[in-house]
Image (tube, rainbow, N blue to C red):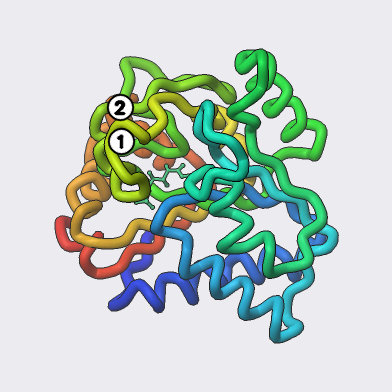
Amino acid sequence: MIVHVFESKDQVAKAAGAIFAAQILKKPDSILGLATGSTPIETYAELVKMYKAGILDFSKAKTFNLDEYVGLPASHPESYISFMRRNLFDHINLKEYHLPNGLAKDLEQECRDYENTIKQAGGIDLQLLGIGNNGHIGFNEPNDHFVYSTNRVKLAESTIKANRRFFDSEDQVPREALSMGIGTIMQAKSILMICLGEGKAEVVEKMINGPVDPKVPASILRTHHHVTVLLDQAAASKL
Ligand code: F6R
């Protein structure tokens, strides 16, 4: 695990943008794993900037998002598909993207299909991750074991509270999501994790210095052979 600490979150976004750019330049048909939430917004803005400047071409790439809420229509502004369109897809020339369908009739089958589609595409070359305050990656919440494949998850109470800021009231925050599993994430050829702000400092310290433990799902990343972690100073303040 390589850890870089930057003074500001702008620098983190530029560094993350550079890692994505290098991946797309060396393999234009890359399979990219994407995340939502506050953390990657500036990184996506960097990618849009590089696309508009004629540096990056996404036309041969394919993307797979980590997760999607169960039960939110795609038209809802807080669905992850809406988030991705707003922050990235509507502004670049990407032709093929995938998110799990949280409205599928058979959600378990949807999870199996999502996992297979990733495999058929050849697996993920570069997976972007944020981290939950409780150590979750994707929506793999603290657990007594690591869940392997794409699965239907019940969001932890702390995640519902953390995501409350995107909705009018806590009641409106979906209680379930479909998420790539820890195994799906760990099969990515390389992983880029971004952690920003003081609120993440404690869990970042646990991920880096604590035991590998399903109670801090992100700690498993220490066993992956190619993980880069980009932190701003606030997120690194407990290291
Ligand atoms: C989002 C995701 C989550 C977030 C995490 C951090 O697709 O899978 O694991 O990365 O909850 O969220 P933010 O960035 O809002 O702090």
Q: How many labels does the image show?
A: 2
- 220 or 87: which is nearer to us? 87
Whether pointer 2 and pointer 1 mark residues with C-beta atoms closer than 8 Å, the reply is: yes
Task: State whether residue 237 appears in this view.
Answer: yes
Q: In this view, does 238 lie to the left or right of 155?
A: left
Tell me the quadrant of the picture where the C terminus can be found. bottom left
Label 2 sits on residue: 156
At a point 47% along the width and 69% down the height, the residue shown is 42
- 23 or 155: which is nearer to us? 155
Q: Mark 2: which secondary structure? A: loop
Q: Position of residue 46 (x, y in %)?
A: 55, 75
- 86 or 234: which is nearer to us? 86
Label 1 sits on residue: 159
Q: Which residue lies furthest to the left in this view?
A: 238
The verdict on label 2 being within 8 Å of ligand 1 is no
Q: Mark 1: which secondary structure? A: helix
At a point 83% along the width and 63% down the height, the residue shown is 59
Label 1, residues with CA under 10 Å away: few <14, some 14-19, many ≥20: some
Q: Where is residue 151 in the image (x, y as percent from the top left)?
A: 54, 21
Task: State whether residue 186 appears in this view.
Answer: no
